[in-house]
Image (cartoon, rainbow, N blue to C red):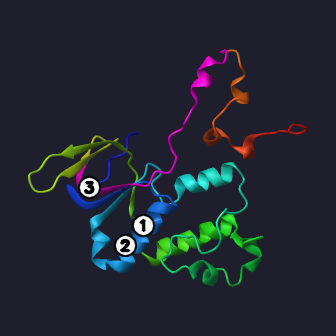
């Protein structure tokens, strides 16, 4: 059954492609400084919700904690995560009090809720960006996988490293090579691997 594409405005001031931690950080900082931007920002991500790809990758790779200390997070207040985790101090890992994955995920959901961003992500992928010439100020047309398009004054790419980078030498390996022995990190799901006795 085909779903109806979401209703979109014809124009927006700012389109953000991707809904991961960097996009969330950008939106919260913009809204802290300019509340009037609330209705002028559209976020596009095929997953349809904030942090979708991040959550999937952290779960698939069974990552217990972040690499960055507790001041690196989407809230404009650098100490907000510490305040949020006052009763969860056991979820910081040495040597630099690295936040646990579940703690960081819960905190990001709290940030999304406090900034009223739950419905901000549009579940569509941007497939192409076209520059529209203008004598005053060029605009950008975003083409979406639904067939719709929208014109944006500004566009931010916050897609992370979502495109797989496969080295050329992979194509030189014989086709009989077992497919489960050569894969990209984005396709690994440790929850489904049974490596007893293997390293």
**Relative vertical location of residue 121 with respect to residue 57 in this rendering, above or below:** below
Residue drawn at (69%, 29%) of the image: 182
Q: Are marks 1 and 2 in contact (CB under 8 Å)?
A: yes
**Relative vertical location of residue 56 with respect to residue 102 in this rendering, above or below:** above
Counting residues from the start of the chain, the first of labels 3 and 2 encountered is 3
**Direction right: furthest residue:** 197
**Relative vertical location of residue 8 with respect to residue 189 in this rendering, above or below:** below
| Label placed on residue 8 | 3
Rendering coords of residue 48 (x, y %): 45, 54
Rendering coords of residue 61 (x, y %): 69, 49
Q: Nearer the viewer, mark 3 or mark 1?
A: 1
Rendering coords of residue 174 (x, y %): 67, 15
- Magenta part of the protein: which range? 150-175
| Label placed on residue 141 | none
Residue drawn at (74%, 79%) of the image: 89
Residue drawn at (47%, 58%) of the image: 49
Residue beneath disc 2? 30
- Image quadrant assignment for residue 80: bottom right
Mark 3 secondary-structure assignment: loop
Residue beneath disc 1? 26
């Amino acid at each position: 059954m085909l779903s109806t594409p979401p209703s979109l405005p014809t124009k927006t001031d700012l389109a953000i492609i991707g809904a991961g931690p960097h996009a969330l950080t950008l939106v919260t900082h913009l809204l802290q400084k300019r509340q009037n931007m609330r209705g002028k920002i559209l976020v596009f991500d095929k997953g349809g919700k904030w942090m979708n790809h991040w959550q999937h990758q952290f779960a698939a790779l069974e990552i217990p904690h972040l690499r960055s200390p507790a001041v690196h997070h989407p809230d404009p207040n650098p100490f907000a995560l510490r305040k949020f985790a006052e009763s969860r101090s056991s979820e910081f890992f040495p040597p630099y009090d690295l936040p646990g994955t579940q703690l960081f995920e819960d905190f990001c959901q709290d940030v999304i809720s406090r900034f009223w961003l739950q419905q901000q992500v549009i579940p569509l992928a941007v497939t192409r960006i076209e520059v529209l010439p203008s004598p005053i100020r060029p605009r950008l047309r975003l083409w979406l996988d639904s067939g719709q398009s929208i014109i944006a004054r500004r566009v931010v790419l916050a897609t992370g490293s979502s495109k797989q980078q496969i080295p050329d030498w992979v194509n030189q390996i014989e086709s009989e090579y077992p497919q489960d022995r050569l894969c990209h990190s984005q396709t690994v799901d440790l929850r489904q691997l049974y490596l007893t006795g293997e390293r």
